[in-house]
């Protein structure tokens, strides 16, 4: 329950300010991984956390960290992306930096964010 309250009171307003609404954020979340420990076990693809974030994606988002952590610490990437709130901030920062109208409908919205999240900015447009 604490996670839900925190999500609604802190993360969602942050994300809304950046044009991602709660439904879009949760759609971007790798639903099979949400709140399960194996989301942060080693994987061949090296994608971690509920949003399946790579180290290069995290770096492109500005290397966000948990409160009190340092971005240059060896474990900072994995610590952040394996934490739901920090990984949500990572996605919001990445999408803010890469606001691209992938489907050319004249607006940047959740559909564009889904395309970017699934295929990368290189495949957008």
Image (cartoon, helix red, strand yellow):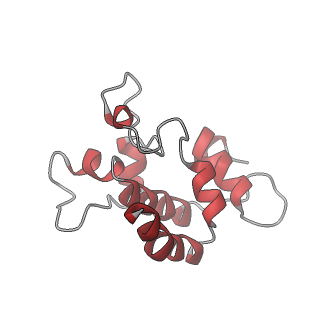
- Seen from the viewer's position, the closer of residues 38 and 80 is 38
Q: Which residue is drawn at the image coordinates 65% and 58% (left, top)?
A: 24
Residue at the extreme top of the image, as rendered:
44
Image position, residue 104 (x, y; %)? 82, 56
- Seen from the viewer's position, the closer of residues 82 and 107 is 82
Reply above or below: 7 against 49: below
In this picture, residue 121 sits left or right of residue 107: left
Image quarter hosting the N terminus = bottom left
Q: Which residue is drawn at the image coordinates 36% and 25% (left, top)?
A: 43
In this picture, residue 21 sits left or right of residue 107: left
- Seen from the viewer's position, the closer of residues 125 and 19 is 19
Reply above or below: 125 against 96: above
Residue at the extreme right of the image, as rendered:
105
Quadrant assignment, res 108: bottom right
Image position, residue 100 (x, y; %)? 67, 59
Reply above or below: 6 against 27: below
Image position, residue 4 (x, y; %)? 46, 63
Image position, residue 119 (x, y; %)? 62, 39
In this picture, residue 84 sits left or right of residue 42: right
Q: Which residue is drawn at the image coordinates 48% and 57% (left, top)?
A: 91
Quadrant assignment, res 84: bottom left
């Amino acid at each position: 329950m604490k996670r839900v309250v925190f999500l609604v009171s802190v993360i969602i307003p942050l994300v809304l300010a950046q044009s991602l609404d709660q439904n879009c954020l949760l759609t971007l979340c790798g639903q099979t991984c949400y709140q399960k420990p194996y989301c942060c076990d080693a994987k061949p693809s090296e994608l971690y956390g509920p949003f399946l974030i790579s180290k290069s994606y995290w770096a492109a988002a500005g290397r966000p960290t948990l409160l009190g952590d340092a971005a240059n610490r060896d474990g900072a990437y994995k610590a952040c992306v394996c934490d739901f709130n920090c990984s949500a901030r990572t996605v919001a920062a990445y999408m803010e930096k890469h606001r691209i109208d992938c489907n050319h409908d004249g607006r940047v919205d959740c559909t564009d964010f889904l395309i970017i999240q699934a295929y990368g900015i290189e495949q957008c447009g």
